[in-house]
Image (cartoon, rainbow, N blue to C red):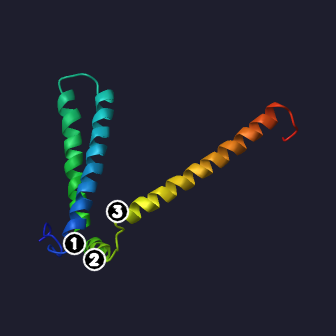
Amino acid sequence: MALAIYKQHQGRHVRSLTGVGLGLVDLVFCYYVYLMLSGHVPDGAYKPYLIYAIPAVVFTVLGGVAFFYMNTPKMADFLIATESEMKKVSWSNRAELVGSTLVVLGTVLVLALIIWVTDTLIAIGYTRGLGLW
């Protein structure tokens, strides 16, 4: 019963994607452990076993912890509620998305230009000793 999936048929998409995300974090962490062990374990007969076995054990343990945690009633109910709320979101169509993106890019460019002009004027005043500082 400990390995049963809580409310198995609800929230499948968000639970699957959360599992994939946690798996990627687990994989990156295990690669970091492998790199640390490769640099710190002295050469010897057991080095290959240590630098591969320890990250494998860490990967398995963290994967089990993630599976257990994602199937606790509190977390599973949260993920199920998240998926149901995401179904209620009204997503933008392509025209709205392109228009909003152009507005954001234009605003960023105008602000960048204002900051560049201000910075240039302050630099000119500073280098000519106009007493701005």
Q: Nearer the viewer, mark 1 or mark 2?
A: 2
Task: Name the one closer to the observer, 51 or 71.
Answer: 71
Residue contact at pointers 3 and 1, CB within 8 angstroms:
no
Q: Quadrant of residue 31?
A: top left
Cα separation between marks 1 and 2: 8 Å
Mark 1 vs mark 2: which is more N-terminal? 1
Q: Which residue is mark 2?
A: 84
Q: Which residue is mark 1?
A: 11
Which residue is found at the position 47% from the left and 56% from the top?
Answer: 102
The image shows residue 88, relative to residue 20, as above or below, that is below
Residue 107 x %, y %: 56, 55
Residue 70 drawn at (x, y percent)? 25, 66
Question: In the figure, is residue 30 to the left or right of 120?
Answer: left
Q: CA distance from mark 2 to mark 3?
A: 24 Å
Is disc 3 placed on a helix, strand or loop? Answer: helix
Residue beneath the point at 66% across and 42% down? 116
Q: In the image, what residue type sits under mark 1? A: Gly
Horizontal side of 131 relative to 39 (left or right) equals right
> Circle 1: is it few (<14), some (14-19), or many (20+) Cα within 10 Å?
some
- In the image, which disc is placed on residue 94? 3
Tags 1 and 2 touching, CB below 8 Å? yes
Q: Which mark is residue 26?
A: none
Q: Secondary structure at mark 1?
A: loop
